[in-house]
Image (tube, grey):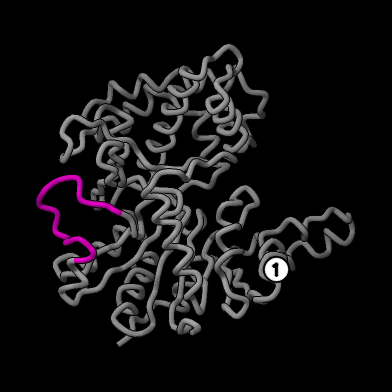
Amino acid sequence: MRPAKNKTIFFLGAGFSITAGAPTQSQLTKEIFNFDVEEFINEHGHHYPDPANIRELAPVKEFIENDFLLNLENADLEDIYTPIDRCIIDGTSFKGKTPRQLTDLRVKLNAIISLIMDSKLRYPVEDGYISKLASYIVDSNKTTDKSVVMTSNWDILLDNSVTDIIRGKGDVLDYCCHFTHSNDGEPFPPPLVARERGNQNHKILKLHGSLNWLWCSNCGRILVKHGEKIALQSYLGHAICRFCTTETLTPQILMPTFLKDTSNTQLKNVWNQAGIELSEAGKIVFIGYSFPLADFEIRQLLARFVRPDTEIEVVLTNGSNPKSYAKIDKKLKSGILWNLPSARYQRFFAKNQPTFCYDGVEKYIDDNYSEVQE
C-alpha cells in the first residue's frame, strides 16, 4: 500500500539561518582565521562560566596558518577537517602533530566554531520568518497535513521557536532518537508520553547533530537542553551525565569533513527515521540548502527513499538563479550553469522535475506560510 501524500518535509540548509545572523561557511572560515582569544573574551566572556578556558583554544589558529597550504581568504572547512580526520583514523602524523595532538586540536577547532555560532545566534534573535514557519509546522501537525523538519544545521533557531509555541500545551519537540532532558524540571514530557496523552510530537531530525545535544558514552542517551547550546559546556569544561554521575558528556556535532562519522547509535536512529519520513513524503521543500556534492551521505539517503512522484520544491537566493549567469556562461563557456545548486537538483531529481524559487528564504516563507491554518 502506498503511503498517503499528505506529509510535507522541510529540509533546511545553512541558508535558512543566514538572515537570522548565521555565517555562511566562507564567512565562518574567515571568522576562524581571525579568531582572537583575548578580543573574544573581552566581548563575549561574560556569557560563559569560566572564560579562561577560551584561552586554551589559541593554538588552533597557529596550527592552521602554519601547517596547511590554504589561502585563508577562501578556504573550505572540508580541506581542514578531512586531512585531520584521515590522520586520526589511520594513526599517522600531520606535519609533526601526533594523532593525539590532532584530536586535541580538532576538539579546540570545534569549540571555536561553536563559540562563533553562539555569539552570532544568541537567543533571542531577529527571526520573524523562523517563527512563522514554526507556527505553520505546529498548526499543520494538528491536521492530516503533517509537517516534518530535516536539517543539516547545528543551530537551534527553529527548535527555539517551536518550543516557545508549544510550551505548556503538552506537545513535545521530537528529535527522533533516545533523548532526555539534561536536568530535572524540564517542562516537556517524553515523546511517547505526549502521544499517549493525545498531544502532538513535532519532529526535527538533525542529521548532523545539534548544539543543544550532549551524548553519554555509558548509557547512550542524548541529553538535551531546550534553548541552550550545552555543547559548549563540554568544550569549555566538563559536562556530567545526570544518570551516570561520573561519565563526561561529549557533543554530537558532525563537522564539515568528507569523513563524517555517523556510527553513533542515536545519530543512526535519526537517519533511519529520516529514511522513513522521506519514503512517506508527498512533498519536500528544500530551503537554503545548496545540495553540495560533499554531503554524499545525504544524497545517498535521498536516492534511497524519495519516490519519483514526490513533489520537489527548492528555495534559493537570486545568486543561484541560472538566468543571472546565462549570458556570461554562453560567452565564456565557463560551465557556471553546470555547477549551480539548481543544476545539481535538476540532475539528481530529474524524474521529480523540481520547481525553484529564487526570492530567498524570508520572502518565500512570508509568501507561503505567514497565515496559520484555522
- The amino acid type, in three-letter code, at marker 1 is Gln
Instruction: For residue 290, say whether it is visible.
Output: no
What percent of the width, then of the height, locates residue 231?
32, 39
Q: Is residue 312 left or right of residue 173?
A: right
Residue nearest the observer in this picture, 211 or 36? 211
Indicate yes or no whether the magenta region holds residue 187. yes
**Image: 372 above or below 243:** below
Q: Is residue 361 left or right of residue 216?
A: right
| Residue 115 screen position, x and y as percent | 37, 36
Left or right position of 318 against 149:
right
Determine whether 258 is above or below 173 in the image. above
Outermost residue, left side: 185
State yes or no: residue 163 in magenta.
Answer: no
Q: Which residues are magenta?
A: 178-192
Q: Residues within 10 Å of mark 1 (few under 14, many from 20)?
A: some
Residue occupying the point 50% across, 72% down: 279
Query: Which residue is at the far top?
Result: 96
